[in-house]
Amino acid sequence: MQFDWTTLGGKAPTALVKARTVAHHAVQWPSKAARANLEAVPDDSHSSLTWDGARGALFSQPLPADDAAVRVGLRLAGLALIVMRGNLVLDTYELAGRRDSMVGVWLDSALRALVRIRSHAARRTVSAASPNHSTNLCAGSMRQRICWMK
């Protein structure tokens, strides 16, 4: 995903507030997946995200799985969650029109079959992992809100 830097400043920052807020809330899901499945570390790096330019997505740290680590990501263009094992995309889930409860159920079920239970405690559900942000993805047009990301 290439960014055209000449477009920077083309929109007033105040015009981007809603899109920025929706993206911020949506990107909490990969972080929640890590918090639910990885040992916590003092610097909170277990919940940090890595940019994958080829996929235009932010990805969680690798989650333990039997054959290859699983990562959960958020593709910014169109706002969709991505579940990957190695370099293989296993599933995607468009967030437009979805309530938090729907996203949590989908992500929990996707990871339940793939990720090993943490050794130090029973695996928490992604829905229960903090921080808890409402994505409020049902209100308004997602295309209007994320047009600045194209």
Image: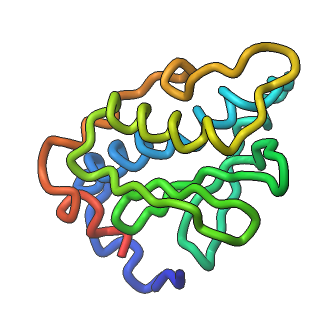
Colour mapping: rainbow
Is residue 110 or residue 71 the one in the foreground?
110
Residue 138 in picture, x, y percent from top left = 18, 42
Quarter of image, res 119: top right
Residue 1 in picture, x, y percent from top left = 53, 81
Residue 63 in picture, x, y percent from top left = 76, 43
Q: How many marks?
A: 0
The answer to whether residue 109 is left or right of residue 70 is left
The answer to whether residue 60 is left or right of residue 80 is right
Residue 67 in picture, x, y percent from top left = 84, 55
Is residue 31 or residue 3 the one in the foreground?
31
> Is the C terminus in the top left, top right, bottom left or bottom right quadrant?
bottom left
Q: Residue furthest left?
A: 140
- Residue at image position (72%, 52%) is 70
Q: Residue furthest top?
A: 121
Quarter of image, res 112: top right
- Residue at image position (83%, 28%) is 43
Q: Is residue 138 above or below residue 42?
A: below
- Residue at image position (71%, 71%) is 87
Quarter of image, res 148: bottom left
Q: Is residue 131 above or below residue 63?
A: above
The answer to whether residue 49 is left or right of residue 40 is left
Q: Is residue 103 above or below residue 44?
A: below
- Residue at image position (62%, 75%) is 53
